[in-house]
Image (cartoon, rainbow, N blue to C red):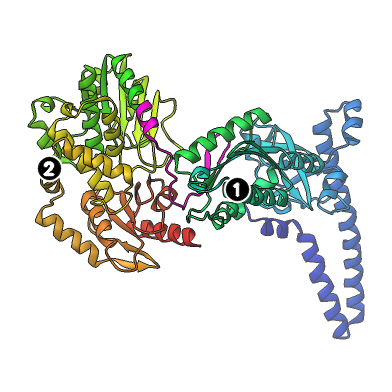
Amino acid sequence: MKTDPKIRRLSESGMAILLFFMAVFALLTAWRGELLLAAAEGTVFVILLVFSIFARRARSQKLTSYAESLIYNGDSAKSSTLANFPLPMAVFRLDDSSVVWGNDMFFKIFGVTTKRLDAHMEEMIPGFSGKWLLDGREQYPTLLDIGGRKYQLHGNLIRGEKGGEASFTGVTYWVDVTDAEEMRSRFQQSRPVPGIIIIDNLDELGRNQTERVRNELRDAVEERLSQWCEGYHGILRRYDRDRYLAVFEKKDLDDMKQSRFPVVEQMHQIESPNGITASISIGFGEEGDSLGEGLQYADKAMELALSRGGDQVVVKNRLSFEFFGGRGLEVEKRTKVKSRVMANTLAELMRDSSQVLVMGHRFADLDAVGAAVGICCLARKCGVRVHVAMDLEHNASHSLIERLQKDENYKAAFVSPKEARQMADGRTLLVVVDTNRPEQVEDAELLEKCNRVAVIDHHRVAATYIHNAALGFIEPYASSACELVTEILQEVTELTDLLRCEAEALLAGIVLDTKSFSIRTGERTFDAAAYLRRGGADTAEVKKLFQSGLDDTVARYKILQQATLHGKVAVAAPDEPQNRVVAAKAADELLNISGVDASVVVSPDGKGNINISARSIGDVNVQILMEKLGGGGNRSAAAAQLKESTLEDAVKQVYAVIDEYFG
C-alpha cells in the first residue's frame, strides 16, 4: 500500500518534532522560574540541533555519493562527464516517486537553489507517473510545462534489490524544447492553406438581366470576397468566370472555423433584380505535405460541397472532412443533358456486366424500393439479369413488395443479401439507390465484394460517402431517388417498357419524399410524376400503399400527445418502443402544428438503441441536426440512430444540437 506523501514527510522529520518539543519545555521551565533546569534543557537543545544539522548534511552527502556511484559506475571519466552534464538530471524511485539524486540544474527548474532529500516527483509535477519507464519507453509521452518552459523528458530504468525484493529506479534527463516548440508552432500556423471558391448560382443571378447588371452582380460578389481575404491577409485570384483560388495561413483558417465562416451568410445580402440571392461554396485543403497536395484536398472538398447542395464550406484534412454552413436551399445544377449522360453511361455499364444487383439502405422505404424497381426496368431493357438485395422481413415497404411479387417479372427478383453475395462475380454491377453512405447500405459486405458500383441518390453527401464509384448520380435538389431514376428511364427506355406496377412503385417513392408534393418539389418533380402517370400509375392504388393499421394510427397519435415545443421545433419522446415507420409518420404529423418549422421524434427500439426521425418544412435544415448525431438525410427529412443509449441521454443530445443550430 502506498504511503501518503504528507505522512511520509512527517515521519522523515522526527528529529525536528523532538527539537520543537524540547524548545517548548525549556521555555515553560524558564517561565516557571526554574532557570538552572531551563539552562540545562537549552544546552541539550543546542547540542541536539547542531548534531541534527551535521547528521543531515552527512546523510545527504552519503546518499548523494551512493547515487552518483550507481550512475557513474565508478569510472572517473564517466563521473566527470555526468557531474558536469549540461542537462538537468534526476534519479527517482518508481515505487514512491522520491528523488534519490538530482543535479543543480534539475532543482533550478523548480526554483530550488539547494538539493532536497524530501523531494518527490509526484509533488513537483502533479500527475507525473513513471509507468512509461516500466513500459519500456525511453521518452515521456507528453511535454512537461514547468514555469512557462516546455521540457521533453528522456530516461531509462535501473533494476536493483531492496530488502530482498526487486526495486526499480528511473534515471531522467530533461531537455528544454521551448524554443523549438515555439518555432514548430509558428511554422505550423504559418503554413499556406489553399482554397477554391465557386459562385454557386452565377447564371441564375444574371438570368434575364443585361450584361451590365450581370457584371455588377459578379463584381459585388468579388468585392465581398476581396474584403474577406484582405481581413486575413490572404491571396485571392479569379481563374474562371465563377471560380476563385484563395490562399490563407493555417492560423487564419483556424480563426475562420471559430467564427464559422460568416462570409457564406453575408453573400446572401447580394440580391439580383429578380430576387435571387448570391450563394458561394468554399473548399479548403489543409495538412497536405505540399501546396499541390493541399490543392487536391481543396478540390475534393469543393466536390463534396457541391454534391451537398452548395452554400457551405467544406474543409478536408488527411483523415476527415469538416462542414460549415449549408443551411440555405440547395442550388439546382441538374439539367436534361446531365440526366441523359448519366442514363447512357448507366446503360453501357449494364450491357458490359454479367448481371446487375440493386441495393438500397437498411429498413428500405418506398423511395428505396421504387428506385430499385426502376433500375430493374432499365436492366430488363438492356437484356441483363437483375436482382434486388433486400431484407424482406425488416423493411418499411411490405405492401409494395407484396404487390410487386404478384407480377411474373418480380416473383424471384428479390433476394436476401446473403444470396446476393453468393451471386456476385467480378463483372457484377451493383447499383446503390437512395443512400450514398457505405455504413447505411443494406449489406456492407456486398458493397465491398463488388468492384463495379453505381450510386443514385438525392441525399446530401456525407464525409463517409461511397468512394471510387464507376457512376455517381447524386443530386440533393431532387425530391427523391425515384425522381432521378424516372429521369434516367425517360432517356433510354420507351414508355411501353415500363410496367404498371413499376410506375406505381416509382410514383409512391416520389409521393413519400415530397409529402404528397407539398415539399421539395420542382419542375422536374412534376415532369417525372406526369411521365409515370402516362406509364399507367394509378394514384388511388398509390394512396393505398400509405394506409396504416388501426394500431399504428393509435400509436402515432399517442406520440403526438407527448410532443413539446423547443422554440420552433416540436420534440416528442415516447417511453415505449416504437415502429420506425410510425415514428416517421408522427414526425410528419407534427409539422401540421402552427408555428412549427421542424419536428423530431426520439423513440427506443426495444433493443437498447434509440431511433431519431427529423422533419422540416421551414428554414431549418434537419440534415445538419442529424449529422451531429451520426445520422444523415436531406434538408427536409433526416434520421439518426444512437447505439446503446438511454432515452433521457438521447433527448439531451437532441436539445443540445438544436440549441447549437440556433445559437
Q: Is disc 1 placed on a helix, strand or loop?
A: helix
Write down the quadrant of residue 432 in the picture: top left
Pointer 2 local density, CA inside 10 Å: few below 14, some 14–19, many at least 20: some
Residue at 59% of width from left, 55% of height from top?
262
Q: Amino acid at mark 2?
A: Asp
Q: Is residue 558 left or right of residue 603?
A: left
Check residue 467 for magenta coloring. no
Does residue 151 sit above or below 73 in this rendering?
below
Check residue 316 for magenta coloring. yes
What segment carries the magenta color? 315-341
Give 99 or 397, whichever is nearer the viewer: 397
**Residues at marks 2 and 1 touching, judged by CB atoms closer than 8 Å:** no
| Residue 99, image x, y percentages | 75, 46
| Residue 653, image x, y percentages | 41, 57
**Is tag 2's residue or tag 1's residue first in the polypeptide sequence?**
1
Write down the quadrant of residue 389 in the picture: top left
Pointer 1 residue? 212
Write down the quadrant of residue 266 in the picture: bottom right
Q: Is residue 163 left or right of residue 29?
A: left
Pointer 2 residue? 538
Residue at 64% of width from left, 56% of height from top?
4
Q: Is residue 532 left or right of residue 23?
A: left
Give 165 or 363, whichever is nearer the viewer: 363
Q: Amino acid at mark 1?
A: Arg
Say if residue 635 shows up in the picture: yes
Q: Is disc 2 placed on a helix, strand or loop?
A: loop
Give 631 or 621, whichever is nearer the viewer: 621
- The alpha-carbon separation of the residues under discs 2 and 1 comes to 50 Å
| Residue 189, image x, y percentages | 72, 43
Does residue 450 sit above or below 301 in this rendering?
above
Pointer 1 local density, CA inside 10 Å: few below 14, some 14–19, many at least 20: few
